[in-house]
Image (tube, helix red, strand yellow):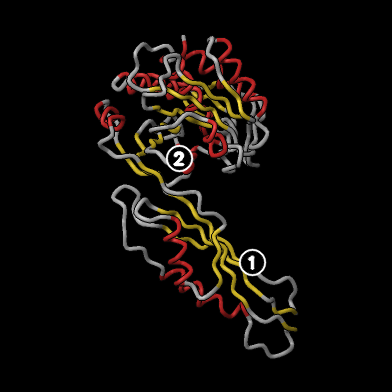
Amino acid sequence: MITEKAIQLLQDLIRIESFSEKENKTADRIETWFYEHNIPFQRNDNNVWATNKEFDPELPTLLLNSHHDTVKPNQAYTRDPFSPDIIDGKLFGLGSNDAGGALVSLIALFTHYYAHPNPRYNLLIAATAEEEIAGKKSLRGLLEKLPKIDFAIVGEPTLMDLAIAEKGLIVFEAIIKGTPSHAAHPNADNPLIKIPAVIKAIESIHFDKVSPVLGPVKVTLTQIEAGSQHNVVPSEVKLVIDVRVNECYTNSEIEQQLKETLPCEVNARSLRLKSSSIDSAHPLIKAGIALGKKTYGSPTLSDQAALDCPSLKLGPGDSTRSHSADEYIYVKEIEEGIAFYIALLKNIL
C-alpha cells in the first residue's frame, strides 16, 4: 500500500543526515522511490523532480513541493534524532514533522496520480534542498529549470488546514553612527546614547494596511551589538530588525518606510522573501473547504516565498513541533494527510 511505503520512505530519510547543503544522500533515497515506481525523474544538485505521465505543455501545471533538508538537532534532544522509532503512534526523528511528513505524503500523492488519464492539470513534484537556509540551490534556484507553474501546494505542517497566505520576511540592519573616543574624554557623539531614540522610532512604526488573513505587518527589534572594550566609545551600534510582511505591501515599500522613519542608516539584507497567497475562490481552496478544512494565514516562512504564482501551504504535522527537541509526527497524521491530498486533487483533476 502506498501509504505504508511513504511511511517507510520517511523512516529511511530520517536515518540519513540531511542538513542544509548536505542533502545528497536523501536525494539519492528519493531517486530510489521513483526508480521503484517506474517514474522518470530529473535531478539538479540535490533537487529531485518529475512530471506526470500525461504531461501536456498546453495544460496548466500544479507544483507539489516540499523539502528534504533539516536544521541541526538542538541540545535539548533526549533521543537519537536519526532513529525513526514509532512509539504510541508517534514517529520520532529529525525532520519527521518539518517537513518529512508533508514531503512523503506529496510524493505518495504524485505517485497515485502519476498515470491519471486525461488530466485537466499537469502535476509536477519537486523534492527540494536548502529550504531551511533559503539557499541558492533550493527551489529558488531550481525554478528556471522547471516547466511553467500556474499554482502550487507547498508541503509544510499545517494540521492539514489550508494556509492560504504566508507572511514575507525582511531582515534589516540598522546602524547608528557616532564618534569613537577614549571613555575618559568628553564625547557628545556617543552612538550608544542614541539607542533610545532609535528604539522609540522602531516602536512608533505603523503600517495602516491590515490583512484580513495575515493581520498587520510585524516589526521586531531582535539584536543589538556594540562595543568591545570598557574604556572605548564605539564608532557605531548595529541593530537587527525582523519584519514580517503581509500581502498588502511589497518588500520595497516596507524598506522605503523604514528608511524614512528611522534616524539611522538602514539596509535590508534581502528583499526576495516576499509574502504569498492564493485566492479563497480558487478551485483548490473551494475543494479543500468542501472537504471540511478551514483557511488561515501562516506567520512562518517557507519556499512559497520563491514562487510568483498562487500557492497554498498544506501538510500533515503541527508547525509548533518544528525545530523542537525530540521532533515527531503522528503516523495517523501521515495516513490522513495522504488520503486528504488524494481526495483534494480528485475534485480538480
Residue 174 location (% of width, % of height): 56, 67
Q: Position of residue 289 (x, y in %)?
A: 26, 31
Would residue 148 be visible to someone looking at this image?
A: yes
Q: Are marks 2 and 1 in contact (CB under 8 Å)?
A: no
How many other residues sit within 10 Å of disc 1, few (<14), some (14-19) or many (≥20)? few
Q: Earlier in the sequence, mark 2 or mark 1?
A: 1
Q: Measuring 54% from the left and 67% from the top, which residue is drawn there?
A: 266
Q: Residue at x 75, y 84 (%)?
A: 182
Q: Amino acid at mark 1?
A: Glu
Image depth: mark 2 or mark 1 in front = 2
At x 59%, y 70%, the residue is 175
Residue 72 location (% of width, % of height):
64, 39
- Which image quarter: residue 79? top right
Residue wearing tag 1: 225
Residue 211 horizontal side relative to residue 303, left or right:
left
Secondary element at image label 2: loop
Q: Is residue 225 above or below residue 134?
A: below
